[in-house]
């Protein structure tokens, strides 16, 4: 194991993050505040509590998930796309670094960044709504697993993207709809029966449900399913990445 | 001498069907400087990229200091420093950070004293805290070299290190290459400047259309392939060369006042004595003589034209 290399990649990527940390934090914090004002205060005041949780508090886990999923995918895809784009990828590719070590460095840095942003949004939420976290350790665990799992997805996107447009396409076209339709702002039990079933094919449902369980001890689907779902996604992403690495797809001609 | 790099039957066919390298065999000795010459698109960068692990070989094998570049890539790559042809650097990062990054990437523990020495050698120490985007092109090239040297490589690949670099910096780089050689580093460089190969190389390889045409000791090459030209200035212009001299394949210069004789320096007899005797026998009076040896450049141009 080339630990020096893992550390080098990780901290080099984190340095990039810290150079632009303010930008990376301001936009999610502002949009979270806006969501709280619109959904939490304006609309939420007219909403009944869901499962005994006030609407303002109910949307907190979904809101965090929305940002964390987007951030994980964008950070990780950009993290690997940028060196490819400017050509500096030659260095890790010609170094005594295994693909696995590269993956830990790049994905670890991306996941750390989205984790930081997720925690900052959580802190912001406390300013707007009274919140209690039923299972704090699970909460952090779910957050971390989600960050890693979707940073893996971002890594795949970053390798496959041919240009910056494609890089933005997947988050906008896939992640946003999945998150909005994944029960971030409602309980899926509020949907008509057909859509309740259809929703179960949306992977994000499991993430939001599990995460919400960690906060309020109530869930749309059983927590074990949520954990299994995250494990399954991570596994699929890792297999795809292994295939990419094996063939050198889009990395080595 | 012991060999450092052994390339066997190495081929590369790009996805486009382009045969960039065609069954290349090459041995590079420990501690030597090998200059690879060849026209644009000859396959120089492709060859280097495959040895460094940036391009998947289509066929063949490479070992570096006995380590196979695919199965023992960690051991092989730790020995290699690469200065790529294209300048590729993280624009917002500081010079010293990217150089330290390279060292870590190659599995070496931080060593501030060594990095300082490298940066000083490359006159980058004063710029160590400057973001790379604020450096001039020549300085960026030096940062690339610093990164390649950051992990104390035993083999250094320099892919056109002096392209677009001014005369002074080029001389600086030659100096650095000489110093590395003195430290026992094996160096492979590609260049389009023949004078660079002439100044630095122990051996010269000529590559064209994906094939190595020759690899030869530089001095021997210039000696072997060097034809010399003898220019004979006459006292009086002549309209036509006397028939008696037909056997020498002389050329009459445009000014009609000098004749040029090409001969092989390695031949048993150069024919000069006979020529001079026959010239005076034909009644031509000599004013001056002058010889010139073909340079590596002439040899090179001769080889790759087809
Ligand atoms: N990634 C690639 N995909 C397809 N063809 C490529 C690729 N890289 C290089 N080639 C082709 O392979 C051949 C050899 O290119 P290479 O870059 O090795 O030449 P070179 O000798 O380094 O030339 P130069 O002196 O211009 O740097 C060229 O015909 C080039 O077009
Ligand atoms: Mg080249």
Image (cartoon, rainbow, N blue to C red):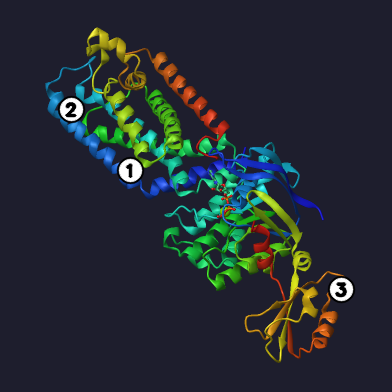
- On screen, residue B65 versus residue A85, left or right, reads right
Asked whether disc 3 touches disc 2, contact meaning CB atoms under 8 Å apart, the reply is no
Q: Residue furthest front?
A: B243
Judge whether B81 appears above or below A50 on screen. Answer: below
Q: Spatial distance from mark 1 to mark 3, Cα to Cα?
A: 80 Å
Nearest the camera: A127 or A159? A159
> Is the distance from the Cβ of mark 2 to the nearest ligand 1 atom less than 8 Å?
no
Q: Does residue B36 appear in the picture of this structure?
A: no
How far across and down, in percent of the image, does residue A16 sit? 42, 48
Residues at marks 3 and 2, CA–CA distance in whole angstroms = 100 Å
Query: In which quadrant of the rendered image does the N terminus of chain B lie?
Result: bottom right
Task: Check contact, mark 1 vs mark 3: CB within 8 A.
Answer: no
Helix, strand or loop at disc 1? helix
Observer-nearest of B203 and A76: B203
Q: Is residue B284 rendered to the left or right of residue A63?
A: right
State the SS at label 2: helix
- Quadrant that contains the C terminus of chain B: bottom right
- Name the residue beneath numbered marker 1: A24
Residue sitting at 43 percent across and 45 percent down? A82
Q: Residue at x 46, y 19 (%)?
A: A232
Queried on whether the Cβ of the residue with tag 3 lies below 8 angstroms from ligand 1, the answer reads no
The residue labelled by disc 3 is B269
The picture quadrant where one finds residue B170 is bottom right
Q: Chain of mark 3?
A: B
Q: Nearer the viewer, residue A86 or B124?
A: A86
Q: Kindly identify which numbered label has been placed on residue A39.
A: 2
On what subunit does the disc labeled 2 rest? Answer: A
């Amino acid at each position: 194991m080339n630990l020096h290399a893992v550390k080098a990649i990780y901290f080099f990527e984190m340095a990039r993050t810290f150079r632009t940390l303010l930008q990376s934090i301001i936009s999610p914090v502002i949009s979270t505040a806006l969501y709280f004002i619109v959904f939490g205060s304006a609309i939420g005041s007219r909403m009944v509590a869901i499962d005994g949780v006030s609407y303002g508090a109910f949307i907190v886990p979904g809101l965090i998930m929305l940002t964390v999923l987007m951030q994980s995918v964008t950070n990780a895809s950009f993290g690997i796309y940028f060196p490819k784009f400017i050509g500096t990828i030659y260095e890790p590719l010609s170094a005594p670094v295994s693909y696995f070590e590269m993956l830990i460095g790049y994905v670890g840095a991306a996941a750390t960044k989205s984790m930081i942003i997720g925690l900052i949004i959580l802190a912001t939420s406390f300013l707007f709504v009274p919140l209690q976290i039923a299972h704090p350790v699970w909460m952090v665990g779910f957050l971390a697993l989600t960050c890693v799992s979707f940073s893996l997805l971002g890594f795949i996107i970053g390798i496959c993207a041919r240009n910056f447009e494609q890089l933005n396409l997947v988050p906008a076209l896939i992640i946003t709809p999945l998150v909005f339709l994944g029960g971030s702002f409602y309980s899926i039990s509020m949907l008509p029966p057909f859509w309740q079933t259809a929703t179960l094919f949306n992977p994000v449902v499991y993430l939001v449900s599990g995460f919400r369980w960690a906060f309020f001890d109530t869930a749309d689907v059983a927590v074990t399913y949520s954990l299994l779902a995250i494990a399954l996604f991570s596994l699929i992403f890792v297999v795809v990445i292994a295939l990419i690495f094996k063939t050198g797809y889009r990395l080595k001609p | 001498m012991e060999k450092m790099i052994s390339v066997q039957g190495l081929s590369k066919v790009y996805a486009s069907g382009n045969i960039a390298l065609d069954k290349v065999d090459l041995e590079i000795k420990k501690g030597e400087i090998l200059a690879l010459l060849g026209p644009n698109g000859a396959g120089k960068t492709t060859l280097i990229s495959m040895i460094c692990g940036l391009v998947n070989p289509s066929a063949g094998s490479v070992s570096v200091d006995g380590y196979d570049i695919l199965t023992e890539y960690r051991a092989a790559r730790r020995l290699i420093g690469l200065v790529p042809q294209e300048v590729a650097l993280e624009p917002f990062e500081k010079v010293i950070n990217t150089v330290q990054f390279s060292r870590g990437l190659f599995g070496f523990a931080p060593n501030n004293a060594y990095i300082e020495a490298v940066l000083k050698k490359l006159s980058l120490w004063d710029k160590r805290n400057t973001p790379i985007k604020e450096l001039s092109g020549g300085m960026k090239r030096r940062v690339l070299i610093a990164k390649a040297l950051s992990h104390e490589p035993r083999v250094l690949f320099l892919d056109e290190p002096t392209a677009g670099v001014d005369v002074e910096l080029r001389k600086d780089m030659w100096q650095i290459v000489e110093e590395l050689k003195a430290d026992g580093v094996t160096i492979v460089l590609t260049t389009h400047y023949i004078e660079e190969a002439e100044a630095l190389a122990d051996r010269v390889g000529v590559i064209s259309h994906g094939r190595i045409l020759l690899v030869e000791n530089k001095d021997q090459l210039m000696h072997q392939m060097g034809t010399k030209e003898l220019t004979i200035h006459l006292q009086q212009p002549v309209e036509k060369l006397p028939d008696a001299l037909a056997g020498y394949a002389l050329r009459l210069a445009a000014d009609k006042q000098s004749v040029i004789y090409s001969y092989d320096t390695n031949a048993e007899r150069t024919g000069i004595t006979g020529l001079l005797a026959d010239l005076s026998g034909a009644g031509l009076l000599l004013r001056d003589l002058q010889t010139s040896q073909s340079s590596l450049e002439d040899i090179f141009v001769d080889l790759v034209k087809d």
